[in-house]
Amino acid sequence: MGRPTISGGTPGVLQGAAPRRPLTAVRTLLRVPDDVPLATLPVSAAGAALFVAAVFLFVSTDPSVSTVVGSLALLGAALLAEAFPVPIEGVAAGRTSLANIFIVGAAVIYGWTEASIVGALTMGLVELAHRRPLSRITFNTGLYTLAAGAAGAAAALASGTGLLALLLATALASGAFYLVDITLLSAVIAEATLRPFPRVYGRSMYSTVVPFAIMTSLAAILVVLWDRSPYIAVALAGPLVAIALYERRVHAVLERLRELDRLKNEFIAIVSHELRTPVASVYGATMTLQQRELDEKRRDSLLSVIFTESARLARLVEQVVWASRFEAGHARLRLERCEPLRLTEEVIKAARLHLPPTLSIELSANAPSPVLADPERVRQVLVNLLDNAVKFSPEGGRIDVAIDGSDGNVRFAVRDEGIGIPPREQARIFEKFHRLDPNLTRGVGGTGLGLYICQELVREMNGRIWVDSRENEGSTFLFELPRA
């Protein structure tokens, strides 16, 4: 039912710093950490006590072999269902665990003792396997134990052995499990988030009522089949697996669509922002040129602005075109033998024409061998890397470009003395639309497509690209291409 547990449904309730908490004296007396809600303590304690009592009664009653085997079968099914929850759209709590079906089934078929044991072991073993913190393990295990015990007690209220009695017992057990689970979990969430309990409780009920109805129906099918023959009940595994696989596939597709929609909106916002400045500059310079009373120096300055901003627009359009080609799989490169030193010298010569006077570019080459690549695309990669180096270099900085051989490849390196890249960002800088300074706090713009295009072009030329960087010490972008 929406996987209503601390570990699965509401991640972070027992993690991270929480706001000021009430009952500080009680928390201090019991030595409870600030990030653990006090409401978890009675649930954990009561669950542990119920589990011990259930184990004691189960052993003391000398259960039959069929009861032990049946309980183990339901435990195994519950473990698999809890370990691989199913994502359901519209359930705010997250992924939905189908383990409730088998725990409720144990409550109706065998009673509260077997159900409590199955519920406790199901959650406890899965939480241990996930290496959850001890406080989360004890609470979630206690939550399932109490809910399972309540389900068994509720099922015992239905008398008789007919079909209607089984269905009534299943409905009562499912309802009891659901109410105990949601009520206790909502109390913990309300304390952890400092929100009113009725609001949290109402929202939890609203978001999980549909999965609850589905679980109740499936549990009823399981119980009825089990009553006829436990072997027939195994047939339920097929539909459940099919449901789980289908829901996972649908959820993955919807997540992908959401990601594409997010990227579309981000792309529109970035490109619109990047287009605004050069278009305004070209428009303003053109309008000014229409005035006849301009001296030659002023006219040349305006023409220079038009040239620079037009080139910027051309680069922007080229980036968008190449990104769309890679996305559609239509990028086609023509590989041939080319001289890396000559290509690099041409790119550096062109870059120096518009290089700020406070920056310098130096080239060092160790007799590089010819490479098998597309020369125009090699130029494009070098231009993008140099452009980034210029953007992030401080005044008076130096950009070093090096070419050297490396294990059957030729290695290109572009090093700057700029701000560097945080370690957490280095794995993402080659992603589409990712920018180190998305809010333009440093005044450095860009579409976030340059490095993505560099990576794809290098891959198309059977090479690889990576970065070596330290914050405030600069960055070195390197890529290798195979020798011809």
Image (cartoon, rainbow, N blue to C red):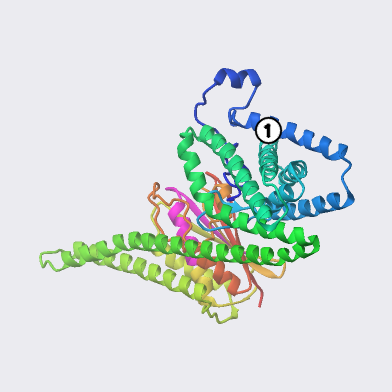
Quadrant for residue 187, please give it: top right
Above or below for 64 versus 43: below
Q: Position of residue 158 (x, y in %)?
A: 67, 46
Residue at 64% in and 62% down:
244
Does the image show residue 259? yes
Question: Is residue 75 rendered magenta in the image?
Answer: no
Residue occupying the far left of the picture? 293
Quadrant for residue 264, please give it: bottom left
Residue at 49% in and 65% down:
257
Residues 220 and 422: in front is 220
Q: Which residue is mark 1?
A: 44
Residue at 38% in and 60% down:
270
Q: Position of residue 81 (x, y in %)?
A: 70, 55
Q: Position of residue 178 (x, y in %)?
A: 60, 45
Residues 388 and 95: in front is 95
Quadrant of the snapshot with the C terminus = bottom right
Question: Is residue 383 rendered magenta in the image?
Answer: yes
The amino acid type, in three-letter code, at marker 1 is Ser
Q: Position of residue 387 (x, y in %)?
A: 45, 61
Above or below for 363 versus 380: above
Badge 1 marks a residue whose secondary structure is helix
Residues 356 and 38: in front is 38
Q: Is residue 340 left or right of residue 393?
A: right
Residues 317 and 306: in front is 317
Q: Is residue 212 left or right of residue 112?
A: left
Q: Is residue 127 left or right of residue 415?
A: right
Please provide the residue range marked out in magenta: 382-404
Quadrant for residue 51, please give it: top right
Above or below for 277 versus 18: below
